[in-house]
Amino acid sequence: MTSSSNFTLLTKRESLRETVAHALRAAIISGEMEPGVVYSAPALSARFGVSATPVREAMLDLVREGMVTSVPNKGFRVTEVSEADLDHITELRLLIEPPTIRRVVPLVPRGDLPRLRRMADEIVDFAERKDLVRYTEADRLFHLELLGYSGNPRLVETISRLRSGTRLLGLAALAETGELRESAEEHLVLMDLIRDGDERGAFALMNRHIGHVRGKWAGAHEEALAGGGAEGAGAP
């Protein structure tokens, strides 16, 4: 972990263990905590500004999720994810998320639009600030919130688990070039499409957006992935 890490001090809006776990997941996914590197609970607790106990508890949660492995007397090693695993995760997300977003467009209450737009604005704000941990967590919350309108908690949990297995090691470089902001602004475009009731447009945008996750953000050929996902999901 470098001195330029975007870790921030945590608040007690939820249990400290859960808060630390969310931040750790975001740090792992964004690449701030590097695959293969061993991190000690005391070092992480100093970074978070909390005691080592909730960090250890949160790390044990991540061990059960397969995001880290325990290294006796040393700490926790971030699990490496293969290129094939990332391809498989992206394939599943493309099969599930675009058609679900298309389905929920007419289900989102008009009264919820301002709150959802604020969530999308936060994603753009964190991209501008190059705060990769908060960006990753805000992005996760926004997507899961939208999927929640499907009324299918198992679907939401499935996508949450898939996202936990993703590694976005290209985020820092994209933040430096300004491309991360461009990707972040897709959330605002999505909100416009939802507001206008454009189901087809929302479907197409979600395909492109997930393609970025595996393409620009992690190094694969996003156009091919997005095209395959649209075809497999039955694009109109």
Image: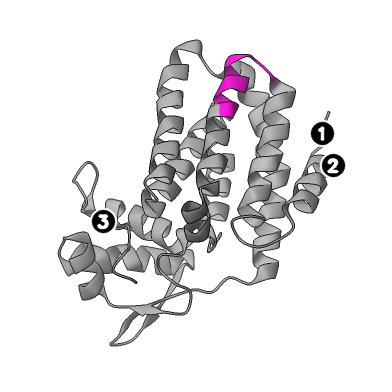
Find the magenta span and give its range: 189-198
Task: Say the numbered circle drawn on residue 154.
Answer: none
Is 75 left or right of 167, judged from the image as shown?
left
- The answer to whether mark 2 and mark 1 are in CB contact below 8 A is yes
Q: Secondary structure at mark 2?
A: helix
Q: Position of residue 42 (x, y in %)?
A: 20, 74
Q: Which residue is mark 2?
A: 231
Q: Is residue 193 above or below residue 60?
A: above
Q: Which residue is mark 3?
A: 17
Task: Say the numbered circle drawn on residue 235.
Answer: 1
Tell me the quarter of the picture where residue 76 sits: bottom left
- The answer to whether mark 3 and mark 1 are in CB contact below 8 A is no
| Amino acid carrying mark 1 in the image | Ala
In front: 42, or 124? 124
| Amino acid carrying mark 3 in the image | Arg
Q: Is residue 86 magenta?
A: no
- The answer to whether mark 2 and mark 3 are in CB contact below 8 A is no
Q: CA distance from mark 2 to mark 3?
A: 41 Å
Q: Is residue 194 magenta?
A: yes
Going from N to C along the chain, the mark reached first, 3 or 1, is: 3
Q: Residue at x 45, y 37 (%)?
A: 124
Q: Position of residue 231 (x, y in %)?
A: 84, 42
Q: Position of residue 195 (x, y in %)?
A: 57, 16
